[in-house]
Image (cartoon, rainbow, N blue to C red):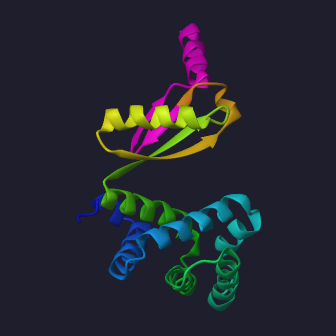
């Protein structure tokens, strides 16, 4: 499988690619992807964990021990634990969110999927998610892995990101466009 050179060109992409190769060789791609999703959720929910990975004053050993404890609490697999330990030892924990994102892209590409991030003003129900997934699948011709988030500031509508493409049909953007047109 060929991995996009855009992903592997970055530092986080190289780490993600190396982790993917190891996981693929050992047959643990799904397990590692699940572990990284747990870690990503923990990073989004915990300001302390986010502070830990971005703390330049924390030594390699302390960071490694702290991340090992976090991995234990989250129930991460051995390969993922070792990988996070390598990031800590190389003082690259700050790249972890980007590594997680890149790993997800590589794994999705290997499965023939496209990742899409959808932001809405209110939580989407299962029927809406299914309908949106089908529409995006028809548009891209590929299987879609949908990640949803809620941002009340968009007021209504959706913001859909597929790779480098963004479809912004939010009310906030429409109001901003109208305001700009009225100024002219």
Question: Which residue in the rendered view is the most extreme toward the front?
Answer: 127
Q: Nearer the viewer, residue 39 or 63?
A: 39
Q: Is residue 161 magenta?
A: yes
Residue 145 x %, y %: 44, 49
Assess whether residue 74 is covered by the magenta stretch: no
Which quadrant of the figure has residue 102?
bottom left
Residue 150 % position (x, y): 65, 39
Of residues 128 and 53, the one nearer the viewer is 128
Q: Residue furthest left?
A: 2
Going 39% across and 44% down the picture, which residue do you hit?
A: 164
Residue 177 drawn above or below residue 143: above
Q: Quadrant of residue 39?
A: bottom right
> Does residue 73 appear left or right of residue 104 in this picture?
right
Q: Which residue range is magenta in the image?
A: 159-184
Residue appearing at x 47%, y 33% in the figure:
132
The quadrant in which the N terminus is found is bottom left
Q: Nearer the viewer, residue 50 or 127?
A: 127
Exactly how many numbered labels are in the figure?
0
Residue at 67 percent across and 25 percent down: it is: 155
Q: Where is residue 123 shown, x and y percent of the image?
A: 66, 36
Viewed as shown, does residue 68 lie left or right of 147? right
Q: Nearer the viewer, residue 9 or 85?
A: 85
55 left or right, relative to 111:
right
Q: Which residue lies at the image location 52% right of the left edge and 79% below the top edge? A: 80
Q: Position of residue 84 (x, y in %)?
A: 55, 80
């Amino acid at each position: 499988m060929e991995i996009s050179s855009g992903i592997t060109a970055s530092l986080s992409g190289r780490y993600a690619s190396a982790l993917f190769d190891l996981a693929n060789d050992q047959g643990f791609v799904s397990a590692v992807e699940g572990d990284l999703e747990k870690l990503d959720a923990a990073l989004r929910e915990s300001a302390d964990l986010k502070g830990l990975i971005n703390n330049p004053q924390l030594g390699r050993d302390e960071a490694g021990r702290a991340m090992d404890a976090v991995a234990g609490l989250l129930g991460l697999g051995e390969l993922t634990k070792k990988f996070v330990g390598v990031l800590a030892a190389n003082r690259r924990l700050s790249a972890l969110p980007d590594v997680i994102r890149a790993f997800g892209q590589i794994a999705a590409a290997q499965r023939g999927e496209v990742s899409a991030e959808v932001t809405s003003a209110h939580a989407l129900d299962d029927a809406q998610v299914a309908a949106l997934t089908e529409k995006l699948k028809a548009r891209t011709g590929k299987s879609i892995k949908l990640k949803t988030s809620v941002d009340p500031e968009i007021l209504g509508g959706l913001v859909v990101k597929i790779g480098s493409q963004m479809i912004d049909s939010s009310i906030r953007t429409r109001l901003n466009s109208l305001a700009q047109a009225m100024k002219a």
